């Protein structure tokens, strides 16, 4: 899919918000004395995948300076 700059920025903002929300959920779960380690592991994996997507979108927004 070929997105314009505004669509990329909107998606980037959406992913950053989701990443931040996941961070809050993980911290809240880990603050409990009997948290589910498997659930936290899955959330951390999802958070890492979001971070990768964010990095990819940032790379598409920044013009290639070498070219």
Image: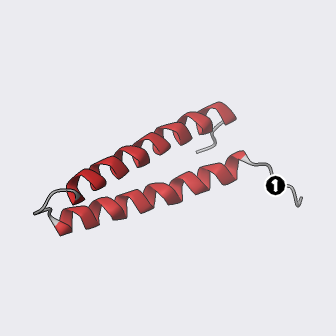
Q: Residue at x 29, y 54 (%)?
A: 27
Q: Residue at 14% across / 64% down in the picture? A: 36
Q: Quadrant of residue 21?
A: top left
Q: Is residue 62 left or right of residue 12?
A: right
Count of numbered circles in the view: 1
Identify the residue position indicated by label 1 in the image.
64
Residue lying farthest to the top in this orientation: 6
- The residue most toward the left is 34
Instruction: Pinpoint residue 16: horizontal percent, then vertical percent.
Output: 49, 44
Q: Which of the 4 image quarters holds residue 44?
A: bottom left
Query: Which quarter of the figure has residue 26?
Result: bottom left
Q: Residue at x 36, y 59 (%)?
A: 46
In the image, taking residue 3 as reference, residue 28 lies left or right, namely: left
Q: Could you tell me which residue is drawn at 35 percent across and 64 percent down?
A: 45
Give the image location of residue 63, x and y in percent. Answer: 79, 49
Q: Is residue 6 above or below residue 53?
A: above
Q: What is the residue that sits farthest to the right in this orientation?
A: 67
Give the colouring mode of the picture. secondary structure
In the image, 16 versus 67, the foreground residue is 16
Rendering coords of residue 19 (x, y %)? 42, 49
Label 1 packing within 10 angstroms: few (<14), some (14-19), many (20+): few
Image quadrant holding the N terminus, namely: top right
Q: Secondary structure at mark 1?
A: loop
Q: Quadrant of the C terminus?
A: bottom right
50 displayed left or right of 36: right
């Amino acid at each position: 899919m070929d997105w314009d700059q505004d669509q990329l920025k909107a998606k980037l903002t959406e992913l950053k918000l989701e990443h931040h929300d996941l961070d809050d959920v993980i911290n809240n779960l880990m603050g409990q004395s009997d948290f589910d380690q498997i659930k936290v592991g899955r959330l951390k994996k999802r958070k890492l995948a979001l971070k990768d997507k964010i990095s990819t979108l940032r790379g598409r927004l920044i013009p290639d300076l070498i070219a």
